[in-house]
Amino acid sequence: MTSARRAAITAGVLFIIGTAAGVLSVAGAADGPGYLHDVAASGTQVIIAALFQLVTASAYVGVAIALHPVLRRYGPTAAAGFLGFRIAAGVLNMLGAIILLLLL
């Protein structure tokens, strides 16, 4: 198996994991009026949502790291930009998970 194919498979698996975790990271208690009361009443749901959000952030960064060697061959600047923006998205996603936990 070539390294490009291995990178593509790894990125694909991480993309699917990130998408599934992103769907599961929705905390319904944190939406709508009276969300502070709802979050306090369903703390376990909020903690699980925050954990899935951290998985999503890790998968975002993992996709970029897996694809970086392949993309660098075609455009080093674009590959570095993709990696940088994915890392920034992962950090913001982690910040969102921390803020969600701070609501407790």
Image (tube, rainbow, N blue to C red):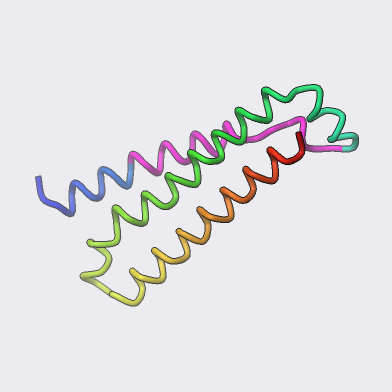
In-image side of 84 versus 49 (left or right)? left
In-image side of 58 versus 26 (left or right)? left
Residue occupying image coordinates x 28% and y 44%: 10
Q: Quadrant of residue 41?
A: top right
Q: Quadrant of residue 68?
A: bottom left
Farthest residue to the left: give it: 1
Residue 6 position, x and y percent, is 19, 46
Residue occupying image coordinates x 84% and y 35%: 35
Residue occupying image coordinates x 36% and y 56%: 64
Residue 17 position, x and y percent, is 42, 36
Q: Nearer the viewer, residue 7 or 42?
A: 42
Residue 102 position, x and y percent, is 73, 41
Looking at the rendered image, the quarter that the C terminus falls into is top right
Farthest residue to the right: give it: 34
Looking at the rendered image, the quarter that the N terminus falls into is top left
Residue 39 position, x and y percent, is 79, 30
- The answer to if 23 sits in the magenta stretch is yes
- The answer to if 78 sits in the magenta stretch is no
Whether residue 47 is situated above or below residue 58 in the rendered picture: above
Would you say the magenta stretch is mainly helix, strand or loop? helix
Whether residue 89 is situated above or below residue 46 in the rendered picture: below
Residue occupying image coordinates x 24% and y 72%: 74
In-image side of 71 versus 15 (left or right)? left
Q: Quadrant of residue 42?
A: top right
Farthest residue to the bottom: give it: 77
Q: How many marks?
A: 0
Whether residue 3 is situated above or below residue 76 in the rendered picture: above
- Provide the residue span drawn in magenta: 13-32
Q: Nearer the viewer, residue 55 or 9?
A: 55
